[in-house]
Image: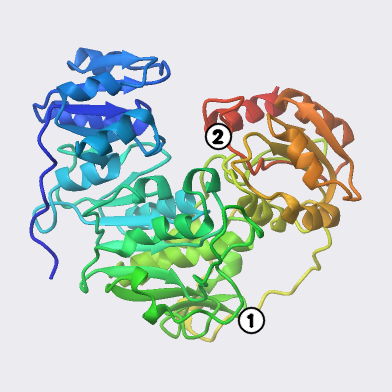
Amino acid sequence: MRAASRPAPPAGPYLVVGLARSGVAAAQALREGGESVIGVDTGAPEGLQELADAGVELYLGEEGVALLDRVGAVIKSPGVPREAAVIARALARGVPVLGELELAWRLLLPPPLGNEVIAVTGTNGKTTTVEWVGHIHREAGLPVAVAGNVGNALSGFVGKIDSDVTIVCEVSSFQLEDTETFGPEVAVLLNIAPDHLDRHGSLRAYTDAKLRIFARQSPEDIAVVPAKLRLDFEDSSSSSSSSSTTTTDPPADLAADPRLGVARRVRFGSDCEAELCEREGWLWWQGEPLLASSELRLRGGHNVQNAMAAAAVCLARGVEIDAVREGLRSFAGVGHRLEEIELQDGVLYVNDSKATNVASTLVALEAFPATAATTTPAAAPATAAAATAAATTPAATTTGVVHLILGGQAKGQDFSALRGPVERGCRGVYLIGEDAPMIAAALAGARVPVRECGDLEHAVAAATAAARPGDVVLLSPACASYDQFADYEARGERFRELVLG
């Protein structure tokens, strides 16, 4: 049975380590609860005056180890590794260390007096799927709030939203590795591909962190998983493959894997036995047609997967099927994810700055197949419900030939998986950021010009000069942005500025 209450956080005073979005939200939530809070950051983040005004004691440009003598517990932002000096010392002393996600979970009231939580994880597609689930709930007239990389951290909702609001929350491996009691009413795994190996050390450790999303669910909860999911990874400290573990290979026995927990499983994918499946160009729910894949506004097969996951979540929770259909049709996507900025002189400029790993860039390239054949849409199933059509905004028409802007901080990834797709679909590659030489070496031998441009300004200029009408200039860096930008959003906004002049 699901617990009617959650354990309280350990007693303070509290030291919040890392003062980016999550750390700020955690500190504010604790202060609003009357707690004594100290904040520390090795850098000097902007926008902390509100914390100072709220009575948070701030220490910037230092590790904060000496501050442990003054606190009862540490709250760790997800970007801070457990190996950081202050965290390692706290753990060695036996000082309780909680992640921001775990803190928020404990501070939020559970149902029926509080909020149900839908948590979404995966290497790629989290933000899109979270926003899509939120969009469908709004289409159905259901109160909903979205937390994650876009907008609020989960702790930002503590004491600030009504109890009938469903929270849809994007959760990362960095957050999940710090969880102790977190057990959302709905947990979603979209896919797993090599990422953050510099932080986790191996693909197996990264996978184990992702699967913690299911660890504390109850049998009354819902676990949404890909129908074809392989979890039998070799333990390695580096990536030998950048393909997603959502695969067309025979699936592992999901029922036998204890890491998927005890919640009711709802599967999505191309497997005809999945509760939400795609076949013959249509999405089906429990054997009945839902809508044609061509009615989705978002480009790319990966967005069909995201749509299936979002629909599975909502339908499994009892959202009206007509609202789900309309929400699938009308969702226009999120910024920085295959975002079509402008068509200039016949060249389409696309902002995919959120592609911070190789797997994400691979699916972006698949959305612009240079040699794709024109296909005839599948005939509609003979049901009135499925035959209803909705107006959509079509994607711009291109030849699919790509000028690809890559680079930044590589995070220990193997970029050789890009060589084949680059040869097949790219007219040129333009490298930026600190790991450009390493990426150039990985692409050596590709029969496509590869240029080290240094920064985004020079890369956009070079791609624009080389592009022909019908081509695509695609920013899909496959890397973190922190060497040159505050985050992927700042990188994407700069790309927009350069395109729009």
Q: Under tag 1, what secondary structure?
A: loop
> What residue did someone put label 2 on?
488
Q: Under tag 2, what secondary structure?
A: helix
Q: Nearer the viewer, residue 318 or 173?
A: 173
Q: Residue furthest right?
A: 447
Residue depicted at x 23% and y 20%: 67
Disc 2 residue type (three-letter): Tyr
Residue depicted at x 30% and y 15%: 59
Q: Earlier in the sequence, mark 1 or mark 2?
A: 1
Q: How is the image coloured?
A: rainbow
For residue 35, side relative to residue 287 (left or right) = left
Instruction: Residue 348: tell me if it is visible.
Output: no
- Quarter of the image with the N terminus is bottom left
For residue 458, side relative to residue 334 (left or right) = right
What percent of the width, then of the height, locates residue 344?
77, 35
Q: Nearer the viewer, residue 42 or 175?
A: 42
What percent of the width, then of the height, locates residue 217?
24, 65
What percent of the width, then of the height, locates residue 251?
52, 79
Q: CA distance from mark 1 to mark 2?
A: 40 Å
Where, by quadrant of the figure, is residue 210 drawn? bottom left
> What residue did someone put label 1 on?
379
Total numbered circles: 2
Disc 1 packing (10 Å; few <14; some 14–19; many ≥20):
few
Disc 2 packing (10 Å; few <14; some 14–19; many ≥20):
many
Q: Compared to 378, does 337 lie above or below? A: above
Disc 1 residue type (three-letter): Ala
